[in-house]
Structure formats: C-alpha cells, structure tokens
Amino acid sequence: MSTVVTTPSETQIVMTREFDAPRDLVFAALTTPDLLKRWFGADGWELVECEIDLRVGGRWRFVSLGPGGMRMGQGGVYTEIVPALRLAYTESYDDQWFPGVARVEADLSGSTTLVTTLTFPSREVRDLVLASPMERGINESHNRLAQLLGEKNELDA
C-alpha cells in the first residue's frame, strides 16, 4: 500500500494513507517522541531530536540527520489537538528549502485513514515542494509507520 498524494487546490497537497491499527495508536505514533524516532523521515534519514509540547500553543521541533551528515531542522506550533482524531500545526524548516510557513492538518477517520493536508503560502511554494523528493520520502516514512503499528498491534493483542 502506498500513500496517495493529490493537489486539490493551488496551494494544497493532500496525502492519504490507510493503516491497519486503531486511531489512538496512530495518533500516539504522530505525537510520541520515542515512537516518532522509529519511523519519521525518508530512508537514510534518522530523527535525532524530537521535542513535543502537545498542547494548543505548544511548540514542536525535529532535527534529522541524513546522508553525508546533512542536518534538517523543522518545527512549529500546535493549533488544534483532538486526541485520536485531529492534529493541526504550523511547519517551517531551518534552512528554508521552501519559503514561509505551511499549515498542516492530520485527520484520522474510519478504519484509520490518515489524511494530511499541507497548505502553503502560494502555488509556487506548493510546486517547489512537489518537485522535491517529498512523495518518495513520505511513502518510505509511512511504510515504516505501518510496520511499527503492526508490531505495536501484535504486542497489545
């Protein structure tokens, strides 16, 4: 199974993926540093710093190490939190590989379908992100998340 990436508007990217796990477990994987470190990022990247203040107005910060020692830092502020249903936050990168701040909304529904909507300041920024290896990276990351959720489901059963 892969993550489906669509562009419903000039400024949005929507990523949709179904996971075989309960919503509360998927939500925990999105918001728990120890779990995020096990799945977040494209192949060849490791999440080495993961700080989460999970409250509206709370900040989050991730730093990943990649090939050749490349560092990528990103962070933002949580704007909405509904456990096991919805997580919304801002996102920007230290190196500003895309300008401005994106709004991210992650919604969980049904048989645990994760729908992540990224809204960018302009079509040009959205297209810059689409031209990057973002789609490959999100699929690699979501594949590891699916594996982790399968392991957690087995442990909890």
Image (cartoon, grey):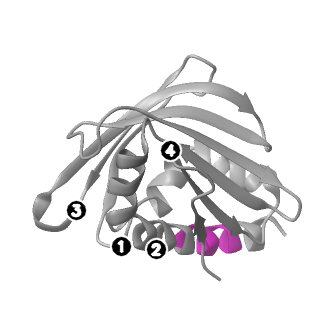
From mark 4 to mark 1, how far is it between C-alphas? 18 Å
x 74%, y 40%: residue = 86
From mark 1 to mark 3, how far is it between C-alphas? 9 Å
> Which of the two residues, 86 or 156, is positioned nearer the viewer here?
86
Percent x, y of residue 98: 29, 44
Q: Which residue is mark 1?
A: 43
Picture disc at residue 140: 2
Mark closer to the chain start, 4 or 1? 4
Q: Secondary structure at mark 1?
A: loop
For this view, does 114 lie left or right of residue 144? right
- Which portion, as a residue range, is magenta? 144-151
From mark 3 to mark 2, how far is it between C-alphas? 14 Å
Q: Which residue is mark 4?
A: 33
x 39%, y 34%: residue = 75
Mark closer to the chain start, 3 or 4? 4
Q: Which of the image's four quarters has the N terminus?
A: bottom right
Of tags 4 and 1, the one toward the viewer is: 1
Furthest residue to the bottom?
A: 1
